[in-house]
Amino acid sequence: MKRFLLLSMLCLVLNGINAQLLLNESFNGLGTGDLPGKGTPVWLPFTTTGSNPNPLLQTTTPLTYAGYNAGGGAEYVSIFQKTGSVQGGRSTYKYFSQSVALNTGAAPTNTFYYSFLVRVTEANQIADQANYSVALRRADGTSESESVGRFVISKETGANGKWRFGLAAGSTQTFAATTKTSNSPSDVYLILIRYDMIANNSDVAYMWINPSLAAEPSLASADATSTTGQNGFGDRIDCLMILQRDTDRRPAADFDGFKVAVGTTSAAAFASLGTQIPQPV
């Protein structure tokens, strides 16, 4: 019996190392108002300068998407464009349940998957000028280069009222714009992003828009891919950030149902992400 218990415990430990759900946030029960200071663990302010609002919890028009229940509650978070001549903005981040160190051993890759719902009101800049809105990063980093797996909402060139979703593995990569466009602020999209964290080599990011979550999607089916350059996030990634900090480069958009998982293989990471209803962690 003792040998069986020890073997069972070892299997649990190995499974925990192989893959883990790191964050599962639906904003349920957080009410309305500023997001920083709410949640368990708490959402923390990344930038506190500027007069623009914090990312804001709202309940007016909940986000829904068939096959991806964002938690069943009414709460979601909104980011805003610059107001008049006011500069700056405020960003917020939430720690994962566990920090993910850069793996420099025999298998130097960790794969992240993260997913969420997004609804765009307005985009303000074309892809190579737009700020990203969501990213993974090292919380105590001081450089923008430490934000990776960046999700961007950019204005469609020459087409007022339309926008594209883009992606960059890190700070040195141009956003890979997709062909997805929309005219309606009521449209809700499911976003799935994969980020391969590779020691001593270029990291790679992939994005799917409105994918099926029944099985891990193929890389060939990705709507955007970013493969160029090494990223300077340091020795770990430990949080999800919602960005709202530049002048006229950020969009106005709503988000809900954030999930982040990691694994030593992409299949393990995707399995940990799962299709379960997100609940606050």
Image: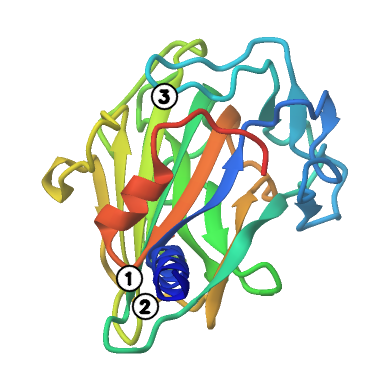
Q: Which mark lies nearer to you, 2 or 1? A: 1
Asked whether, in this view, residue 202 is left or right of residue 238, the answer is left
Q: Which mark lies nearer to you, 2 or 3? A: 3
Mark 1 crowd level (few <14, some 14–19, many ≥20, 10 Å Cα) = many
Q: Nearer the viewer, residue 54 or 219?
A: 219
Q: The residue under label 2 is which amino acid type?
A: Gln
> From this viewpoint, which residue is outermost toward the left?
220
Q: Is residue 127 visible?
A: no
> From this viewpoint, which residue is outermost toward the front?
1
Task: Residue at 37%, 19% (x, y): give it.
Answer: 67
Residue under circle 3?
189
Residues under numbered marks 2 and 1 in contact, where contact means CB atoms less than 8 Å apart: yes
Task: Residue at 43%, 40% (x, y): give it.
Answer: 126
Q: Is residue 27 above or below residue 204?
A: above
Q: The residue under label 1 is which amino acid type?
A: Asp
Residue under circle 2?
230
Asked whether, in this view, residue 198 is left or right of residue 9, the answer is left
Q: Which mark is residue 203?
A: 1
Q: The residue under label 3 is which amino acid type?
A: Tyr
- Element at label 2: loop
Residue 239 image-quadrant placement: bottom right
Real-space CA distance between mark 3 and mark 1, rounded to the nearest whole angstrom: 25 Å
